[in-house]
Image (cartoon, rainbow, N blue to C red):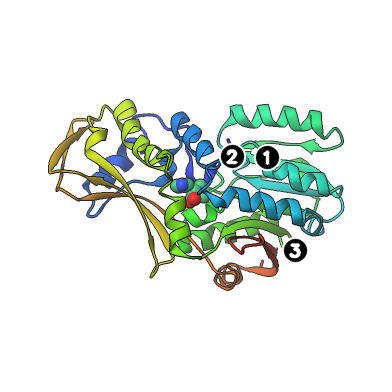
Amino acid sequence: MAVRAAVRDESIKPDSSFLSDVIAGLAARPKRLAPKYFYDEAGAQLFEKITTLPEYYLTHCELQVLRERSAEIARFFPANSALVEFGSGSSRKARIVLSAASTVSTYVPVDISAEMLNREADELRRDYPSLNVLPVVADMMQPFSLPPAVAGMPHAGFFPGSTIGNLEPHEACSFLRQAGRMLGRGASFIIGVDLVKDPKILNAAYNDRAGVTAKFNLNLLARINRELGGNFDLSSFSHQAFYNSERHRIEMHLASKKRQKVKVAGRTFDFRAGETIHTENSYKYSLESFAALARGSGWNPMSAWTDANGKFSIHALVFDSH
Ligand code: AVI
């Protein structure tokens, strides 16, 4: 599952932050829930399905850019370097760049799911016998330590999928700074970023005809029912996703179809008809606005590539700050 440990936390126990975040989010005005809670097992499977949908161009386009530009991307990986992937999931995209980069001697996949990491690491060792694979179980949004074995090596980062778009721009900036401090001065960073485009294409990508994105969104309520003893009636909420052109983001919401009360962990929450829970933002950048964000976070934009239709971009950055 290539999802985005950025927005996933499988280690949640019902009595931990999931419960307190849900209670606080449903009590807030407007109501909100963090997108990292989408990714329980059912949510992760639904996301995998989303990446195969015809309307969800992001994955197809990013794979196209990675395949077409793998040789150019590989030039950003110095001799005997360590490639650190943030939220590695299935490492499907890393395989494309690793196959083109003989200079990478160590691959450090970072993910919150130990089980997936170890399984994928075994397969990578089998398929790339000369590659040293050193997985790290961590929440990549928090500072974490790299394996001591890569200490003296040049580092490069890899963060595909436009998961950076699920962060608020100020959070994306903190994430980039933190990654830069960890990877070190002179490190390169290859990042996938979805681009601003015709709202029709954006709206279709998050309102697919098969209804998978709607299921993915509603699964959050099902998860609250399963894990926190909630009594959400899923049929009385609907999926909403629309492009907010002022803020350059897709917003996802769950809208209450009627006036109703919902109980979670013994607490009651009132919904007005039409009231929504804001569940996700997915920011879209121009090549320039992402380069500006990178610059403001201590990174020097070096190259950017897009697919033939200019829908999705891959940026190469080099860390310039201390
Ligand atoms: C993981 N992330 C980049 C996806 C996105 O497009 O923002 C999550 C997603 N939400 C709805 N569809 C996909």
Real-space CA distance between mark 3 and mark 2, rounded to the nearest whole angstrom: 27 Å
Q: Quadrant of the C terminus?
A: bottom right
Question: Helix, strand, or loop for circle 2?
Answer: loop
Where residue 163 appears, as percent x and y from the top left, is: 53, 51
Q: Amino acid at mark 1?
A: Arg
**Nearer-N-terminus badge (3/2):** 2
Do residues under tags 2 and 1 come within 8 Å of each other at their CB atoms? yes
Q: Quadrant of the N terminus?
A: top right
Where residue 250 appears, as percent x and y from the top left, is: 41, 57
Residue identifier under label 1: 92
Real-space CA distance between mark 1 and mark 3, rounded to the nearest whole angstrom: 26 Å
Q: Residue at x 71, y 44 (%)?
A: 94
Question: Helix, strand, or loop for circle 3?
Answer: loop
Tell me if the residue at label 2 has its CB under 8 Å from ligand 1.
no
Where residue 287 appears, as percent x and y from the top left, is: 60, 69
Viewer can see residue 238: yes
Question: Helix, strand, or loop for circle 1?
Answer: helix
Depth check: give the residue in front, 67 or 247.
67
Q: Is residue 137 above or below residue 62?
A: above
Real-space CA distance between mark 2 and mark 1, rounded to the nearest whole angstrom: 7 Å
Residue identifier under label 2: 2
Q: Which mark is residue 179?
A: none
Residue identifier under label 3: 186
Examine the image and state in which quarter residue 51 appears: top right
**Nearer-N-terminus badge (1/3):** 1
